[in-house]
Amino acid sequence: MKYKKWTLTQKLEIITASEDMGIVEACRKYGVSTGSLYSWKKKFEHKGEAGLKVTYDTKSKELKEAEEENRILRKLLSNKEIELEVQRELLKKKFGTSDPRKI
């Protein structure tokens, strides 16, 4: 079954129709599951129309790109830190000192 996106006005229309003709009949007429309709009614009762508004991913393209760049830079930094730690350990073994910065 294909997922359908309902607009705010469609949801309000279906809710009012369900109050007039009943839940089951409204669901059959509009092709909505009873679970969706009950969920919409609950949201509408608690938050009004704001509860029924369609909420998609609100992150902008620039923010997503910045987060991806941040993830890549963190990975590079952690790799560099590991590399430096390995070099410190090798210097300890080579010169027999506990603190390679004293060299």
Image: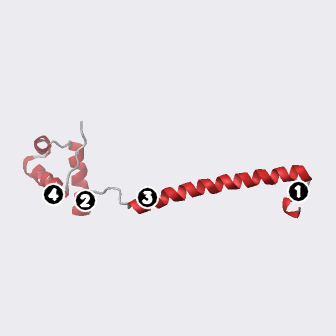
* Camera-nearest residue between 44 and 71: 71
* Marker disc for residue 98: 1
Mark 1 neighbour class, 10 Å CA radius: few under 14, some 14 to 19, many 20 or more:
few
Q: First in sequence: mark 4 or mark 1?
A: 4
**In-front residue for pair 79/37:** 79
Of marks 4 and 1, the one in the foreground: 1
Q: Which residue is mark 3?
A: 64
Q: Residues within 10 Å of mark 3 (few under 14, many from 20)?
A: few
Crowdedness of circle 4 by 10 Å Cα count: few (<14), some, many (20+)? few
What residue is pinned by disc 4?
Answer: 9
Judged by depth in the image, the label closer to the viewer, 1 or 2, is 1
At which x and y percent is residue 90? Answer: 83, 50
Q: Earlier in the sequence, mark 3 or mark 2?
A: 2
SS type, badge 4: helix
Three-letter code, disc 2: Lys
Type of amino acid under label 4:
Thr
Mark 4 → mark 1, Cα distance in angstroms: 72 Å
Foreground disc of the pair 3, 4: 3
- x, y percent for residue 61: 39, 59
Q: Earlier in the sequence, mark 3 or mark 1?
A: 3
Residue 45, relative to residue 32: is it above or below? below
List the residue tagged with mark 2: 53
Residue 76 horizontal side relative to residue 62, left or right: right
- Mark 3 vs mark 1: give the one in front: 3
Q: Earlier in the sequence, mark 1 or mark 2?
A: 2
